[in-house]
Amino acid sequence: MYEYTEVAPFKYALSIDNHEEIVSALLAFCKDNEIYAGSVSGIGAVSEATFRFLDPATMKYVDRTFTEQMEITNLIGNISIKDGEPYLHIHITASRSDYSCIGGHLLSARINGACELIVEDFFDGYIGRETDPETGINLFKF
Ligand code: FE
């Protein structure tokens, strides 16, 4: 599913295998390495991706899947802990064949080419996350 190396203490270079789904592979990496607080950044290429937009007027999530080859021009996010499990909050910008960009929350993305991530494990740090009862959004809870 992935290969990785610890390039510096608590800092990992992670290469997810071609045709894998990024979010589930990254979550598996966090669980395998017991990472519950940290940051992630990355680049790569995908053939299909589902992005999420939160409409503040309705407080409803709108999800949309794009099936086309795109470069991940920026993937950035954080790792926290919710209900005892690693929780990913990731945003993505991806460029299309006409060089325009689209983006949003990253729900899932199928790699077609490569996906190179840098993960920093905050190790002893604690970043909790809980569902805010007023908005229904999962927020940091320290
Ligand atoms: Fe977000």
Image (cartoon, rainbow, N blue to C red):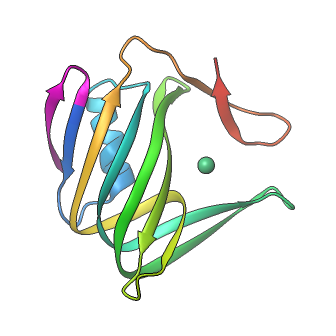
For the point 18% across and 25% down, the residue is 8
In the rendered image of this protein, does residue 128 appear above or below residue 110?
A: above
- Most extreme residue toward the top, as rendered? 124
Q: Is residue 111 left or right of residue 76?
A: left
For the point 33% across and 30% down, the residue is 120
What percent of the width, then of the height, locates residue 35?
35, 26
Please identify the dominant SS of the magenta region: strand
The magenta stretch is 1-11
> Which corner quadrant holds the C terminus?
top right
- Most extreme residue toward the front, as rendered? 99
What percent of the width, then of the height, locates residue 5?
12, 35
Q: Is residue 71 left or right of residue 4?
A: right
- In which quadrant of the rendered view does residue 138 lie? top right
Is 135 inside the magenta-drawn segment?
no
Answer whether residue 87 is visible to the viewer in this image. no
In the rendered image of this protein, does residue 52 appear above or below residue 13?
A: below
For the point 36% across and 50% down, the residue is 24
Instruction: Between residue 94 and residue 133, name the one nearer to us.
Output: 94
In the rendered image of this protein, does residue 31 appear above or below residue 99?
A: above
Q: Is residue 32 left or right of residue 127?
A: left
Counting every numbered tag in the picture gives 0
- In which quadrant of the rendered view does residue 27 lie? top left
Instruction: Between residue 24 and residue 52, name the one nearer to us.
Output: 52
What percent of the width, then of the height, locates residue 46?
32, 70
